[in-house]
Amino acid sequence: MLAPEDGSADLIRALNNRLVALSFHIREYYWIDMKKLNEIYRYKTEEYSYDAVNKFNIYPDQISPWLVEWMPNKGGYLIGNLQPAHMDFRFFSLGNLWSIISSLATMDQSHAILDLVEAKWGDLVADMPLKICYPALEGQEWQIITGSDPKNTPWSYHNAGSWPTLLWQLTVACIKMDRPQIAAKAVEIAERRIARDKWPEYYDTKKARFIGKQACLFQTWSIAGYLVAKLLLSDPNAAKILITEEDSELVNAFSCMISANPRRKRGRKSSTQTFIV
């Protein structure tokens, strides 16, 4: 932690500037919902100017076929990765939950992430919460990215397996957004079998019906995930120590940057204020 003293003032100012730029970059360019998906679908390519809408030269044909059918009308999330000419559209639970808890996501985005969890409950929770990512890498994509890793076969382990330890993080996110009923429903599902299954590390298959083929049993983090979730639901105030509220300076800076973004105001006079993004 840096104290706001004369010697650290410049460093704190530089850190805040970088934080504003990083937060804007994640919130604006990593966010996907039905509106943004339709926008990408209509992208023009090979744009080279400050006013370019398609800043990363994403080709509409790169939209994953599964996403077109999967994206709900209400809800959204932060995608897995973004680089020139490529977007990883997978949903990663851990990153999205912590974006809510840490206020990296805006309030609207945070609610939208939980809306998506509710809308896609059968995919992300199913018989045991919670999918670590969705969907699984399969076929040639699995062979190339994982090197045909036998532990990370489709719908297993880190390749879209279901991890009970994520329960407590889901609970903190839900408590922050005043939607604890979502977490309570997930805890109720876990209670039906997790103790009987001897507290496994993870579950396999699309619906998390099987104990993971290489899952260790009596895992501390699986037990802790359930217990912490239960305790937080019984005493929501205890979650405050884990939650970061949104910074007002960041909100103001983000609003200014959004209003100056050519993607949102094409054809209008550009802002005279300059931001490094």
Image (cartoon, rainbow, N blue to C red):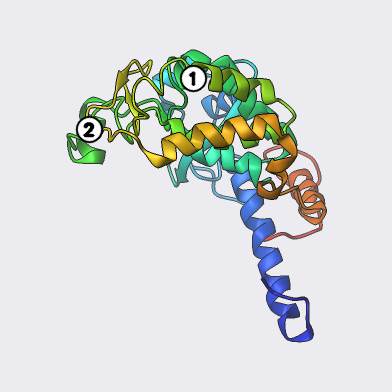
Q: Position of residue 169 (x, y in %)?
A: 56, 37
User: Mark 1 is on which residue type?
Assistant: Glu
In-front residue for pair 148/83: 148
> Which residue is drawn at the image coordinates 27% and 26% (left, top)?
154
As drawn, 264 above or below 271: above
> Which residue is drawn at the image coordinates 75% and 48% (left, top)?
246
Question: For this view, does 260 lie left or right of residue 71?
Answer: right
Label 2 and label 1: CA atoms lie apart by 22 Å
Q: Residues within 10 Å of mark 1 (few under 14, many from 20)?
A: few
Q: Position of residue 162 (x, y in %)?
A: 39, 27
Q: Residue furthest bottom?
A: 7
**Given this view, does label 2 or label 1 mark the residue nearer the observer?**
1
In-front residue for pair 169/116: 169
* Placement of the N terminus among the 4 image quadrants: bottom right
Q: Position of residue 197 (x, y in %)?
A: 34, 22
Q: Residue 214 has which mark?
A: 2
As drawn, 49 above or below 32: below
Which tag, 2 or 1, sits closer to the chain's start? 1
Which SS class for mark 1? helix
Which SS class for mark 2? loop
Q: Residue 74 has which mark?
A: none
In-front residue for pair 182/259: 182
Residue 71 seen in this snapshot: yes
- Can you identify the residue that label 1 sits on? 191
